[in-house]
Image: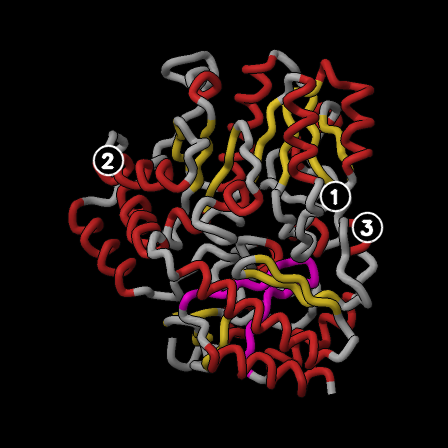
Amino acid sequence: MTGTTSADLFARAQQIFPGGVNSPVRAFGAVGGTPRFIARGSGAYVWDAEGCRLLDFIASWGAVILGHAAPEVVEAVQAAVTRGTSFGAPTQEEVELGGLIQAAFPALERLRFVNSGTEATMSALRLARAFTGREKIVKFAGCYHGHADMLLVQAGSGVTTLGLPGSAGVPAAAVRDTLVAPYNHVDAVASLFRQFGEEIAAVIVEPVAANMGLVPPHPEFLPALRDLTAAYGALLIFDEVITGFRVAFGGAQARYGVTPDLTCLGKIIGGGLPVGAYGGRWEIMEHVAPLGPVYQAGTLSGNPVAMAAGAAVLRRLADPTVYPALEERAALLADRLRAALAGRAAVTQVGAMLTVFFRETEPADYTQALECDSAAFARFFHAMLARGILLPPSQFEAWFLTLAHGEAEVDAAVAAAREAVA
């Protein structure tokens, strides 16, 4: 890549891909400027096409928790590739990774591997509708569960970043049975159940909202969802694509002590390779083909290379010292950022992720998150980038730490933030 700049690559990419990218937020549309094309990564850092080293708080949107090119993951992938990249048949690797996930998530009595978080949520909701014989689902404004048609209603993440109400091309019929409630508002959910309780198949929620920026759940929120769904015979689905193996070894359900009926996973369980999974109670999962009538399939599901990478990561994360260290480091960064930003922004933090919100107080829901000063964030983003800190290019995305982010990286980020807001 010598002599090739990010600007050169972006110009070429725009002739190949819509907007020059293969996922919208990467285009820097919310912050302006030219996206950095990444050449390589190691530990907490990435190097762009120009060879500039950047301290990375994107971490493949949370998927890379050990740090880039972690030796155990590289070794596992190299060994798996020599045996073959795909077979379209069962392998030992998928059995081993599935067992590791079950050990961490006891609620996943049976699970099915897929290839993305979108596939996981889409499949879980199809299963919930089949199991309950109902059609309506409840989601929360600002929560993003992938780009399946029925879920692109008041979605967060890139949909919010780009200012889109949902998505063109989604027919009205696809979202007719999707009900939307404000996150952290129990009364609103209860009202939907009073009105549509016998028609609601499931409630799907990010147990820690991370696609409107990071918004933690109020203490009563998740337990109330558990009680309401149980009372009305609906299923509770936790979308733990982001929180799974990030906020605790057993995900948000372990951290908050609330057990869902179905769980969706992704990101970390693939060690940086494409992967997803959904699972839950046996009496629900036995409805999935080939045992039951709910059809779902995938040529690359359970890909042996992704399975090997994910297993390497989960074995490392099983060390009981890992999560306390991650939490301590993230809390230290959050506390020092609050001091450095001196009232100009609020900072939320759960586990190894955080968000700097350019508003006076921490938001509790999507409406409050939208009150942030996105223009101020864009200026902050570029000021940090100029100082070698790579942040997610959107006010509405979470920052992610890895095991490779140490005290030196915290110091560097805080020093850059002080200069950026000066």
List x then y, in percent, for residue 346.
74, 67
* Mark 2 Cα shell of 10 Å, populated few (<14), some (14-19), many (≥20): few
Residue 391 part of the magenta segment: yes
> Which amino acid type corresponds to the residue marked 3 in the rendered image?
Thr
* Mark 3 Cα shell of 10 Å, populated few (<14), some (14-19), many (≥20): some
Stretch of the chain drawn in magenta: 388-403
Picture disc at residue 46: none
> Which amino acid type corresponds to the residue marked 1 in the rendered image?
Asn
Q: Main secondary structure of the magenta part?
A: loop
Q: 206 or 1: nearer the eye?
A: 206
The image shows a total of numbered marks equal to: 3
Residue pictured at 39% horizontal, 27% vertical: 110
Residue 42 part of the magenta segment: no
Residue pictured at 49% horizontal, 76% vertical: 55
Question: In which quadrant is the N terminus drawn?
Answer: bottom left
* Residue 353 to residue 409: above or below: above
Asked whether disc 1 touches disc 3, contact meaning CB atoms under 8 Å apart, the reply is no
Question: In which quadrant is the C terminus drawn?
Answer: bottom right
Picture disc at residue 87: 2
Residue that badge 1 annotates: 184
Question: In whole angstroms, how far apart are the C-alphas of marks 2 and 1?
Answer: 44 Å
Q: Which numbered disc flags the more N-terminal residue, 1 or 3?
A: 1
* Mark 1 Cα shell of 10 Å, populated few (<14), some (14-19), many (≥20): many
Q: Which numbered disc flags the more N-terminal residue, 2 or 1?
A: 2
Q: For the residue labelled by badge 1, is the local secondary structure a helix, a strand or a loop?
A: loop
Question: In whole angstroms, how far apart are the C-alphas of marks 2 and 3?
Answer: 47 Å
Residue that badge 3 annotates: 367
Q: Residue furthest left?
A: 83
